[in-house]
Each structure stands twice: as C-alpha cells, then as structure tokens.
Image (cartoon, helix red, strand yellow):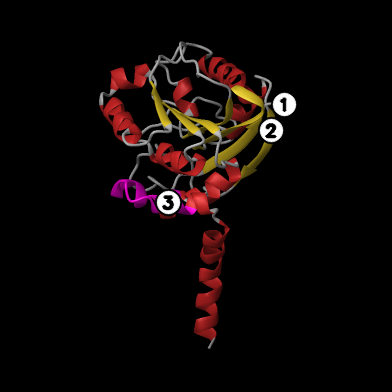
Amino acid sequence: MKPLIAIALLTAPAALAAQAASPQVAAALADATRPPADTARDAARKPADFLAFAGITPGMKVADYIMGGGYWTRLLSGVVGPAGKVYAYQPAEFIAFRAAYGTEQEAAVKGRGNVVALRAGIAELTFPEPLDAIVTVQNWHDLHLKMAPANTGEYVAGKLFAALKPGGVLIVADNASAAGAGFTAADSLHRAEGAAVRAEIESAGFTFAGETRMWANPADPKTKIVFDPSIRGKADQFVYKFRKPG
C-alpha cells in the first residue's frame, strides 16, 4: 500500500493543477492547431499556472510583447476568446536580425481572428486600444543588449505603462542572473537580475503586485549562458506581476 500512497502523493499536485485550470485555459491547451513544438514545452512551461497568475480571462485585450515563436500568443488567443484581442508584437529590429521571427509571427497569427500582428520598431510601437494585460517572457534582458540604445529598458517600461488601462497588469518573466549583476549579463548569459528589472519597471509608475516561483531553480549557478546544454530549459527564472494604479 505504501508505494500506492507515495504515487498518489506525487501525482496529486499535477491533478490539482489540472483541475484548477479554467475551461478556457483547458480548451486553449487542447487546441489541435497548436504545433507539436509548443505542446512539447507544456510540461516545463506550466502554462495553466502562468495564465492563472497573469489573471487572463475571456474578453481581455492583451499584448504578447516580443512574442518570439508565438507559444504564448496562441494560448492567449484561446483564453481571451472571440470577444477579446491579442496584439502579437515582434520588433522590426528582431525581424531584421533574424527573418524567421517574421515567419513565426505569421504562423502564430494565421487562422486566429482575434490576433493582430504588430511589427513596428521598439521606439515606434503603439497599440490600437488600451490594454488589460501585457505579457513578456524571457525578453527584458534583450532591452539591455549592447546593440540596444541606452535607456531602452526605461523607455519600454514607460511605453507599456501608458499602453495599459488603469488597473491593468504587466507580467514579466526572465532568466535570472546573480544578485548584484544588474543587466551586465544580458549579452554574455542572456540573463537579468530580478531586482534590477523590478526597480526599472517600478520607476515607470508601476506597483509590484506579486511574484510566482513556478520557474525557479535554486540549483542554477547563474554562471552559464541559458543556451548551454547543461542548463537550457532549466535556468532559474523570476516571474513578476506589476499593476498600473487606478
């Protein structure tokens, strides 16, 4: 009996998480149009937990800021539903650097009537309407690469603050660097210090509304680039929620 009890205890958290997923999140995860590369990441990404933390619900107007391959764009589309809208933003600078970013954006938008592709430059980006939420995952360090103009992070924080409705939320997740590193590991390790990110975003007027340790990995030494095979997909990450007062 003891082995059975142990198995039950080990599997209970996963079962509870599945039960906690809203019908909209469950349907978005089960969407047959999601590519296999996306579904293969679900176990590690814990999307139901992330979307619950973000507070995404049907009818919301949201942005996937620096959308990458579209993993979150597709899920956000399913959750906000036909009454909602997803603005999938891929910076023109990124597409110029890697043309596949444009192709990936097109693939993520195709067949999703509630998704609008945006690809202006970082300095030129505007959203067509006030937003309820903005999600940006593993991107904040990119605003501090050597190729980025000085103060890009501060500028973007201000732009995102202006884009949100009063009470709207900004969800920021990124690979964590060592304490005190600030943004010095942005180029070399593709990491950012959580405290530095938080200070930069709060300086734009946001209030800190909480965090989740769902992607934390205390065993990560934070000394390797996140693409190193020994740590890829397992880097320690912070996930913060910020709110625009009002």
Q: Quadrant of residue 193?
A: top right
Q: Position of residue 99 (x, y in %)?
A: 26, 23
Towards the viewer: 145 or 23:
23
Mark 2 belongs to which amino acid? Answer: Phe
- Residue indicated by mark 1: 245
Which mark identifies residue 29?
3
Tell me the distance, in whole angstroms, between the alpha carbons under discs 2 and 3. Answer: 29 Å
Q: Secondary structure at mark 3?
A: helix
User: Which image quadrant: the C terminus?
Assistant: top right
Residue 218 at least partly seen: no
Mark 3 belongs to which amino acid? Answer: Leu
What's the residue at 64%, 24% (across, down)? 165
Residue 174 at least partly seen: yes
What's the residue at 54%, 21% (across, down)? 129
Residue 141 magenta-highlighted = no
Mark 1 belongs to which amino acid? Answer: Pro
The residues colored magenta run 26-41
Above/below status of 135 relative to 28: above
Which mark identifies residue 208?
2
Towards the viewer: 118 or 241:
118
Q: Position of residue 19 (x, y in %)?
A: 55, 62
Q: Earlier in the sequence, mark 2 or mark 3?
A: 3
